[in-house]
Amino acid sequence: MKALEVNGVSKRFPGMEKLALNRVGFTLEQGECLGIVGGSGSGKSTLARVITLLERPDGGSVSLFGKEILGLPRRQRKDVYSNIQMVFQMPLESFDPSYTLGASIAEVARSFGATRAEAKERALEKLQLVGLDESFYQRFPSQVSGGQCQRAALARALTANPSVLICDEITSALDVSTQAHIVSLIERLKGKASIVFITHDLALVSELADRLLVLDEGEVAECGATESVVANPQSTCAKKLMNSVLSLGGLG
């Protein structure tokens, strides 16, 4: 059974003539990493927000392990939130500034039935997994670097033990060493969870993704095996992305 199926998803924002998403569709297999690439304004983040029920589309469907989720009433969405977790591009904005990092992470475990002690233990475990020691449990978001905050955001998402992890431009604001750590962690997660890795960085996602989906102005320009898209891009958008990477000396 497919982990995620997106069919014909469209979205137009109020006051905008052009569709942000125009009949976008793809599948995500269990244990697969799908890279979604495209330029600024291509619809990548809007698509992520639709998948995670943060944005209501104007049409289309999203199924999680064969069950349609877009029409679920709020009281039935808890299972969706435990199965799909998203890590945002701007992690600081996703944390409550009045909570320590540890408290925010533990709160996720508590929301799924863990005791206070179990929640703290799980939070410490996930912090260690992303390379942050136990001192970060007591730190506030404003007291850590952007890279450390992004790792904490990933730890929080993993606390729910999601089946599907959506990563939206999570390396774009990180230094090279922190970026490498995050990429290494995502590599280790492959096979344990199905991953959607959204980025404008084709060179980076080519190291991670089994397949690539190229978005261009809200439409799927191309989708296929990573090696195929990189070696022989068919769409104009994919060719431009490849040329941009090659001009910067990427992809080997």
Image: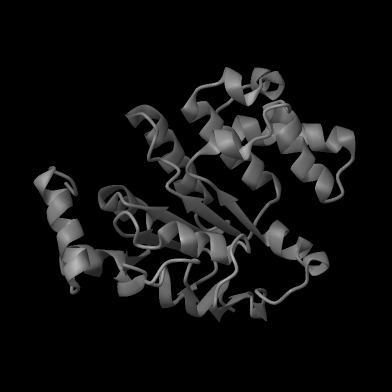
**34 and 221: which is toward the camera:** 221
Q: How many marks?
A: 0
Instruction: Report the residue that reaches farthest toward the left.
Output: 247
Q: Position of residue 46 (x, y in %)?
A: 48, 61
Q: Quadrant of the N terminus?
A: bottom right
Quarter-of-image position of residue 137: top right
As drawn, 125 above or below 53: above
Q: Residue at x 30, y 49 (%)?
A: 201
Q: Report the residue that reaches farthest toward the right.
A: 115
In the rendered image, residue 200, in percent from the top left (x then y), is placed at 32, 51
Residue drawn at 12 percent across, 43 percent down? 249
Seen in the image, is 125 located left or right of residue 31?
right
Residue 185 screen position, x and y as percent: 49, 41
**Residue 107 occupies which quadrant of the picture?**
top right
- Residue 59 visible? The answer is yes
Describe residue 92's horizontal placement relative to residue 249 as left or right: right
Q: In percent of the image, x 50 and y 22: which residue is there?
A: 145
Q: Is residue 154 left or right of residue 21?
A: right
Residue 130 seen in the figure: no
- Across and down, in percent, residue 196 comes to 47, 59
